Each structure stands twice: as C-alpha cells, then as structure tokens.
Amino acid sequence: MNALSGSIPHSIFNLSTLKVLSLLLNHLSGSLPPNIGLSLVNLQELHLSSNRLTGEIPTTISNASMLTWLQLNNNSFTGSIPHFDNLRSLQVIRLWGNNLTGADSPDQELTFLSSLTNCPNLEYLELSLNPRMNGVLPPSVGNLSASLITFQASNCNIRGVIPSAFGNLSNLQTLDLSTNNLTRFIPATMGKLKQLGKLVLYNNRLGGYIPRDLCLMSNLMNLGLHANMLVGPIPECLGEVKSLRMVIMSSNKLSSTLPSEIFGLADLIYLDLSSNNLSGQLPYIGRLKAINQLDLSANEFSGSIPESIGGCESLVYLNLSKNAFNGSIPQSLGEAKGLSKLDLSYNHLYGSIPESLEKLKLEKLNVSYNDLEGEIPDEGCFSEFDALSFLNNFKLCGSERFQVPSCPKNHPKSKVVALVMKFVVPPFVAFLFVVVGLLILIRRWRRPRDKPPPTENSSKLRSWKVVSEKELEQGTSSFSDTNLLGKGSIGKVFKATLADGTEVAVKVFNLKVERAISIFETESHILSTIRHRNLVKILGCCSNPEFKALILTYMPNGSLEKWLHSDKNCLDLVQRLQVAIDVALGLEYLHHDHTYPVVHCDIKPGNVLLDADMTAHVGDFGIAKLFGHDEAAVHTIAMGTIGYAAPEFGSDGMVSTMGDVYSYGILLLEMFTSKKLTDEMFNGEMRIKEWWVKH
C-alpha cells in the first residue's frame, strides 16, 4: 500500500529463507521469474494482489511445498492455471481478476481443480473474473478439502452442468458460480450444504424447478438465482429458512402464486421477484418488518395492494409496476417513513393519491399509466416531482408543471362527496334494505286474506289498441333513428305518435333472431295479466307473420342506466331512494300479489324506466317466467345479464323469486356507488360485491 512502481527485483526471489512476501496494493509491473518455486523453498505466504503484474504464473510454484497463502488476484496474469499437486499445506488461493485460462477448449474439464484435491487444508478458492477460463467443472470438485469454506468462480465462462458432487463439501459457506454458461438443473444435493450462507447462481442458463432441497440449508442468508430460465412455483418451504436475508429470483419464468410463507421471514431485507410470470393476489405483507427493498414488478399480480404494507417499517424501495393491481393506493403507505423510491406504474389503480405520501421523503415516484383521479398533492416531497411521475392518468388535475388540467375551484367539495360515499352511503344502503323489507312486510300483512285473486278477462284484451304496421311506420317516420329509444339483442324500441296523437313506445321484434317470436308471446302474455303503477303498461300490439311489435307506455325520462352513468344526468340521494322503493314495490307485486308468481329474470338499470314524474317502472319481460300454482322454482335455458343474474341462474339454470332479489341487491349497489359492472376494475375475482365488502 505504498504506490510502489516498476518491476520486483529478481534478487528478492533468490532469498531461500524468505517465508512471507507481501507487496499487495501497489503499482508493480513485470512478470514472475520462472524458477520462483525452486528458489523460494521456504515460502509460506505470497501476497501480490492488486498490482499490474503480467505474464504467466510459473508452473514451478507447485514446488513451494510449504505455501499456505497464494494471492495473485487483481492483476493481468495470462496463460493457463498451473496444477497445485504438491501444495498440500495450501489454505488460501486467490486468482480472481486476471485473464487466466483453464482448458484448451470449452468442452474440456478444468483439470487444475482436480489437482487441488491434494490440498486437504484448502479453505478459500477464489477464481472469479477470469472470463477466458472456459472449460467444464469436473466431478472431482466434490473431493476438494472438507475444510473448504469459499468456492468462487463467477464470470469465468464455465460451461456444462453444476456437478452434484458439490453436495459433499459439507463445510462450504459461500458458493458463487454466477455469470457463466451453466445449463440444465440446480442439483438437489445442494440441500446437503447445511453450513452454506451464500448461494449465487445468477446469470446462467439454468432451467427446471427450484429444488425443494434448498429449504434444508438452515443457515442460508443470500440466495441469488436471477437471470436464468427457472420455471414452476417458488417452494413454499423457503419460508422455513428463517436465516434468509436476501432472495433474488428475478428474470426467470417462475409461475403460480406467491407463497404466503415467504412473507413470514421477519428478518428478510431484500426480496426481488421481478420479471417472472407470478400471479394471484399478494398475501399479508406486513410481517416483513425488516424488508428494505421489495421488487415484484413485471409479473401478473392482481387484486388490491394490501393495506398491511404499512407494517413494512424499514421499507426504502418498493416497485410493484407492470402488474394488474387494482383498487386504490393504500393510505398506510405513509406509515413506511423511510420509503424513498416508489414505483406503481402500469397497473389498474384508481382513486386519489393519498395525502399521507406527502409526509414521506420520497426521492422518486412513478404512478404513471393508471386510472388515478383527483388533485395531485403539491406539498412535501411532491414539490420535487414533475410530469413524468404522473403520465397517462387522465382524471388527475393539479399544478401546471404536472402537465394535467387545473382542478375545479370547488375541489374541496369533491373531498366531502368522497367522505360521504365512504362513511354515509354504506350504512344508508343497509338502512334502505331494512326499510324496503319492512314496507313489503307491511303491505303483505295489510292485504285482505279473503280477497279473491285477480282474474284475466277479455275486457282487458278488448281495451288494447290494435295498431296497423302502416300506422306505426308513419308514427316513427319509417322507424327512423331519430326516433330510436334503444336497442337490444332481439329488437329495437322507437318513440311513435299514433294517429290519435298519443305518444307511445313501440318495441319492434327482429324476427330473424332465434326465439324472437316466443319472447314476443311471453312478454305480451305476461304484460296483459299485470297491472301495477311500477310496471310498464302495455297499450296494444301489432302482429302478423312478417311483423310483430308491442305498444307500451312512453317513458320520457328514459332508463335508469342513463341517469346513473351519464355526465348530463344526475340523481340525488332522495331520488335514488325513491327509485329503489318503486322497483321493490313492482317486484313485490310480481312475486306475491299476482295470481301466480312472476319472475322477471333480468333486473338491471337498463330495464328500469322513468316517467315524466321520475316514477320508476320495471319493463322488458322478454325472458320472464310465469309460475304455476305450486311452483317455487323452475329450470330455464334463458340467461339473464351477466353480473346481475344470481349464481344459480348461470350454473344450473334455476329460476326463482330469490334470483330477482339478488339482482335487485346488485342494482342497489350500482345505484348508490355509481360504479358500472363493466368497469375495468371488476375482473377476475373482483366484482362489485367483493369491492363493496373491501370498501
């Protein structure tokens, strides 16, 4: 460590009594004399590392039979590594950081390693950073010293397989074979290395499964398997290796879900599983009290980011980007006081950016390519960020430097609305269920028990308007799109003005659609038997072999769906409550007051129509079922709308009045959350019911 330069005087190598020669960390150059092992017969330690020495390592070094330490690392030595057969006292050999070779061709074994089996006291063997070494690891590595503690041979262009004989080195604590061209599998015999604390095999071409035998390494602290071609699941038994501090398995082809046992490693500091095919939801994550860096990016994780992440008290770096996470950013992230880098980009996150993040000392933030909304905070650490942190979140607003629209002046009101939606609406909806239920029970209790059931008579049918196809064509301007009110799978609905000036809705059936005629007959039959203020009233029909249509009461305010999911229309809380009651009363009549129970089978916002007074009417009875006297449930092949239909409807075609009650419940959730069932957040296992429970 004296910045000495020039070559080493050859006269030093003639000192036969010399035991220790240490010239490390200088600027010495030149080469070693070819007879070094013949002249320094008593040499025990040779320390020449971190100089500028060149040439070959003399083969005569093997004659210095008393040598215990050989450190030639971090120089520019070339040529092949000599054999060390006679160095039986050798304990440490460090040759890393040179340009040494080990075999004449890539398919040949590194025979110098076999010569080291004659060194029973060898503890440290470090060969890394010799990129021209080439060759294959011989099976004889299993015969190296039982005292061997370290075997390092990274970045040596080693080929072939990892010999299973490594399992014989029972006292090995460090095994580094990273950045080579190793292929095939990780041998299961690695599990025998009970003392191993560091296993790094990254940046090779290893394939197959991660062997469960690695879980037997009870002292393993550092496991680096990244940048390989490993497949299959992460063994859940790794959660039993409590000594683990660092686990890196990124850039493989690992699949399946993430074992919850991994998150029980209370002393884990670094976990990187990025760039794999892992999926599913994150388990409880708050047990990682010591975690400093967590990278799960570029996988297929879904579901919400767990609130428990706030329990990761030591977290500094968090990367969950390029997944399919949905839900909102947890407020609890603000509890990770040391967090400095946060990347949540390229997910399906929605909601506002938590104000709790302002209090952190974030140096880097990326929430780009999500569906976030509301105002971008502009205080605390956010004062240091620019537009690159928030790209492609089209509902965000805030400061001009973020390149987003300015927030409305009344934006504090939106926070009030959010609080109302979170803390007021849920108990209100629960109260609504109770009120509607009580109303139905009271009406049923007050109904006279001796009242005869209503009968169907011909006078009702005679009161129908029988309208010709020509009159309907004239009243709709030849069924012009300007009079189109809506369209569905079996036809279209038009606004028409009849000859007497009456405005009506005309439901025209597309007879090219299979089952259109049967649906026409079902709907006309059921509508002719029902009379209730909250059900759409039939006024007449037009029927011939080529044309079929129903004449219905015109509803000037359209469907409930238009009012729930339109920027131009809005219902206040009282109006929503009244609509909910109207629909419930209509269903109560169908289920209990009609001569025979009627099951609608397709309750949804699009089938709830609003008249001029905003009174709700249930319509579209195309797939409804009229039960017999003793029937409580029937089977059907007709399907309701996905998301609204009860599970038993889709699974086995079972229809009952309870199915309508289920659909009504979904309708209430949609009404009082204004969330569409087709929203991108509702996919896989996350639907409006599950979202409601979580929020």
Image (spheres, rainbow, N blue to C red):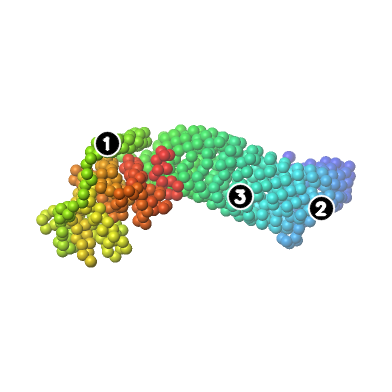
- Closest to the camera, between mark 2 and mark 3, is 3
**Distance CA(mark 2)–CA(mark 1):** 99 Å
**Distance CA(mark 3)–CA(mark 1):** 70 Å
Per the image, the residue denoted by label 2 is 115
Identify the residue at horizontal 21%, vertical 47% (top origin).
Answer: 454
Q: Quadrant of the N terminus?
A: top right
Residue 550, by quadrant, is bottom left
Dot 1: few (<14), some (14–19), or many (≥20) neighbours within 10 Å?
A: few
Q: Position of residue 69 (x, y in %)?
A: 80, 43
User: Is residue 383 among the parts visible in the rendering?
Assistant: no
Per the image, the residue denoted by label 1 is 445
Kind of element beneath mark 1: helix
Mark 1: amino acid? Trp
**Residue 478 vertical placement versus 539 (above, below):** below
Mark 2: amino acid? Ser
**Distance CA(mark 2)–CA(mark 3):** 32 Å
Dot 2: few (<14), some (14–19), or many (≥20) neighbours within 10 Å?
A: some
Q: Residue furthest left?
A: 500
Q: Position of residue 385 (x, y in %)?
A: 44, 41
Which of pointers 2 and 1 lies earlier in the amino acid sequence? 2
User: Is residue 662 among the parts visible in the rendering?
Assistant: yes
